[in-house]
Image (spheres, rainbow, N blue to C red):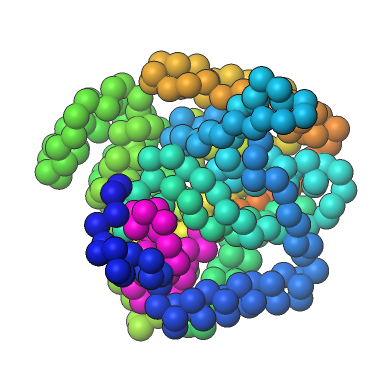
Amino acid sequence: MPNQLAPETAWRPTASLSNLQLRARLLRHIRDYFAEQQVLEVDTPILSAAGASDVAIDSLMSHVYGPGFADGQSMYLQTSPEYAMKRLLAAGSGPIYQICKVFRDGESGRRHSPEFTLLEWYRPGFDHHRLMDEVEELVSRLLGLDCVAERISYIDLFQCYLDLNPLDVDVATLQACAVQHGITVSDLGHDRDVWLDLLLSHIIEPQLVGAVAGQVRLVFVYDYLPSQAALAQVNSQGLAERFELYLDGVELANGYHELADATEQRHRIDADNERRREMGKSEMPVDEHLLAALKCGLPDCAGVALGLDRLMMCAAGVDDLKQVLTFPLETGL
């Protein structure tokens, strides 16, 4: 997006000094919390030879030249530090966390940016329910507010708000539901998950707002369709052990009871690439280092990624990420 600001003011940060100070305080509190919990802070590379296979995520690419790369090597800017952190877990790191920059193409708007800050952590011995407990504790502490947390399964969410069962609903019914709620979109194809995501973001999420008895409302949605959680374990009911956290309708975190089976993980990456081909997207190289780490042995663990810029936006009481970022891409940097 071209810079729309006057040249004499375009150099200024879009975040106020008070919001920059808020960011510094929250980062300090996060590190204090994990130090108390004896969770190790780690740092992993931003560039990788493999990008995320998830069809809902588009990676940004770069090219590296130099010794060993005379003809240039295509690299991907990380969409999450997950693969590298799982290699550390398999190597015996124990519980770990990381605060880092991540990159996703096509992300823009009040709540989106192609470059943003992520807090990601992994807890050996936790399942996704126990990790939800910790996420609730940390978010409540960071906000310094009384929070009331609700938990609802993905299936119950759709049945409650749209009277649809996502396990067996067909695309035609989802399309009709969108039209009924005044949503006009170009053809999204016949991928059921794409339509479910549309209804979730446009109809359900806006209803996950409002304080409860004067307390901040946190909503955890858990146990998704397996097709929507390529990195999660599947339980005996055939549901993926994944959760998302919403704070007053804003999606903040995405967590998993992590898949540890290398053969199954390769199968899911191949399935993702097949869907990418069908959607006209580029296939992603397979991260063989990740699969080798899983084969060696990933401890049973749960992990979560939390968008810090969105959390800071909520903590500051503002409704646009630009108000908590120094120099957003939209300003021309």
Q: Nearer the viewer, residue 160 or 37?
A: 37
| Side of 17 where 138 appears, left or right | right
- Asked whether residue 95 is in view, the answer is yes
**Residue 206 in which image quadrant:** bottom left
Q: Residue at x 49, y 55 (%)?
A: 116
The residue located at (77%, 29%) in the rendering is 67
Which corner quadrant holds the C terminus? bottom left
- In the figure, 119 relative to 175: above or below? below
Q: Residue at x 38, y 66 (%)?
A: 11
| Residue found 25% across the figure and 33% down from its top | 174
> Is residue 327 found inside the magenta-colored segment of the image?
yes
Most distant residue in the front direction: 8
Vertically, is 315 above or below 287? below
The image position of residue 278, as x and y in percent, is 41, 16
Residue 127: in sight, yes or no? no
Q: Is residue 270 left or right of residue 94?
A: left
Residue interval drawn in magenta: 307-333
Taking the magenta stretch, the answer to whether it contains residue 280 is no
Q: Is residue 175 left or right of residue 254?
A: left
Q: Give x and y (percent) for residue 219.
A: 43, 62
Q: Relative to 172, is 51 on the left or the right?
A: right
Can you give x and y, in whole percent of width and height, for residue 22 in the image? Answer: 50, 79
Task: Give coordinates of residue 52: x percent, y percent.
Answer: 56, 34
Total numbered labels placed on residues in the image: 0
